[in-house]
Image (cartoon, rainbow, N blue to C red):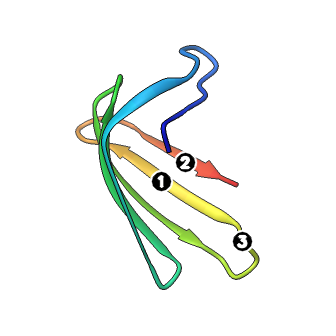
Amino acid sequence: MAGGEQAELGRQPMWDLSLSFDSGQIRGSGCDVVGSFSLLGDITSDGTVAIRKKYHGRHTVDYLG
């Protein structure tokens, strides 16, 4: 994952992105233009991916795909 699309900011790079996948669960961390973050999510049996990106001391962003 090299970056994401945001309506206001466009595609932004990420640094120090680390992801792990275990039994349908996704965990990770990294840093982007907003700040450092942690990731927690799930992959369901039908392939749906839901991830919550929590910026440390700030807001959260939910991704569904």
Could you tell me how far apart the alpha carbons at marks 2 and 1 are, in whole angstroms? 5 Å
Crowding at label 2, few (<14), some or many (≥20) Cα neighbours within 10 Å?
few
Please give the name of the residue rendered at 70% of the width and 82% of the height, measured from the top-left corner: 45
Query: In the figure, residue 13 lies in which quadrant?
Result: top left
Q: Badge 1 is on which residue?
A: 52
Between tags 3 and 1, which lies in front? 3
Indicate whether 31 appears above or below 65. Answer: above
Answer whether labels 2 and 3 touch (C-beta < 8 Å).
Answer: no
Point out the tag, 2 or 3, that comes first from the N-terminus.
3
Where is residue 47? Give x, y as percent.
72, 71
Q: What residue occupies the far right of the structure in this picture?
A: 46
Residue 14 left/right relative to 45 = left
Residue 62 tag number: 2
Q: What residue occupies the far front of the structure in this picture?
A: 2
Between tags 2 and 3, which lies in front? 3
Answer whether labels 2 and 1 touch (C-beta < 8 Å).
Answer: yes
Q: Quadrant of the C terminus?
A: bottom right
Amino acid type, callout 2: Asp
Q: Secondary structure at mark 1?
A: strand
Please give the name of the residue rendered at 59% of the width and 60% of the height, measured from the top-left corner: 50
Indicate whether 25 appears above or below 51. Answer: below
Where is residue 7? Give x, y as percent.
64, 19
